[in-house]
Image (tube, helix red, strand yellow):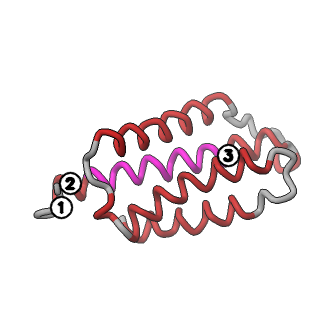
Amino acid sequence: MRYVNGFFCVVLTLFALVQYNDPDALVWFLIYAIPAMWAGVAAFRPDLLRPRLHTIAAYLACLAAAVLGSLYLWPSLPDNWIHVEEEREGLGLIITALALALVGIAWWLRRHWEPNAAG
């Protein structure tokens, strides 16, 4: 899971960085950067994912926002979907929701399967 989360950290960071010319660049930068941060922590500093109430609440809020955003902007993928910004945004939100779900799975696996990781 460490490699998968590391991959999503890099990919989402690149997604965030290419938002510089978007009309709503700050919003989309944050939409990609925050899940990139969660994936980076899960990959490179999993010891920071301790089961604290505020950490769990922050993670669940990010996951819920990504899932709800994905459902709201779910792409219909017409023939020219690459030229329709809403379609690309929907796909980006699906990728962020997937990345956050994998962070949660890695967090759960670490907590329940690794000795002394429950901390």
Indicate the quadrant containing the N terminus: top left, top right, bottom left or bottom right. Answer: bottom left
* Disc 1 target residue: 117
> Residue 109, percent across and down?
25, 55
Q: Amino acid at mark 2?
A: Arg
**Tag 2–tag 1 contact (CB < 8 Å):** yes
Q: Residue at the front extreme? A: 54
Q: Which mark is residue 7?
A: none
Q: Amino acid at mark 1?
A: Ala
**Tag 2–tag 3 contact (CB < 8 Å):** no
Q: Which mark is residue 111?
A: 2
Which residue is located at x 85 percent, y 43 percent? 84
Q: Amino acid at mark 3?
A: Leu
> Residue 102, percent across and down?
41, 52
Q: Secondary structure at mark 2?
A: helix
What distance separates the C-alpha of mark 3 from that of mark 1?
Answer: 34 Å
Image check: 69 left or right of 111? right
* Disc 3 target residue: 91
Query: Which stretch appears magenta?
Result: 91-108
What distance separates the C-alpha of mark 2 from that of mark 1?
Answer: 6 Å
